[in-house]
Image (spheres, helix red, strand yellow):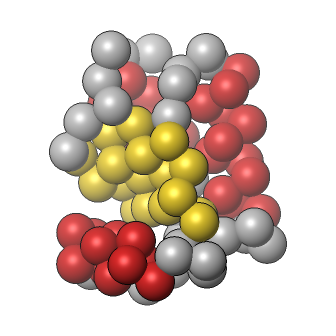
């Protein structure tokens, strides 16, 4: 299975939607709270060019925002 990392903040509604979607599809993921972890926030910005969340890393492929079609495609759903 491909490694999935979700860069998020506790107050972001789209982050919650992404995490729920992954859970509903039994996808294991690592959640990274960029509000609490500045190192992770800098990593997210350097990898994606984005300061907003969610940013999802699916096996090295970056998805900006809750782009369900792209996430499903990358996960083979």
Within the image, what quadrant is residue 42 found in? bottom left
- Residue 67 appearing in the image: no
Side of 55 where 33 appears, left or right: right
Q: Quadrant of the N terminus?
A: top left
Q: In x, y percent, where is residue 24?
A: 71, 21
- Residue 77 appearing in the image: yes
Q: In x, y percent, where is residue 10?
A: 75, 67
Figure check: 76 above or below 55: above
Side of 3 where 77 appears, left or right: right
Figure check: 22 above or below 9: above
Q: Residue at x 52, y 25 (%)?
A: 28
Side of 23 where 70 appears, left or right: left
Q: Residue at x 63, y 45 (%)?
A: 18
Q: Residue at x 60, y 30 (%)?
A: 22
Q: Residue at x 73, y 36 (%)?
A: 20
| Labels in figure, total | 0
């Amino acid at each position: 299975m491909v490694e999935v990392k979700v860069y998020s903040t506790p107050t972001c509604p789209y982050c919650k939607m992404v995490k729920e979607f992954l859970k509903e599809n039994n996808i294991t993921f690592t959640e990274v709270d960029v509000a609490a972890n500045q190192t992770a926030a800098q990593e997210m910005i350097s990898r994606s060019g984005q300061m907003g969340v969610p940013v999802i890393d699916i096996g090295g492929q970056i998805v900006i925002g809750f782009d369900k079609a792209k996430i499903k495609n990358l996960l083979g759903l």
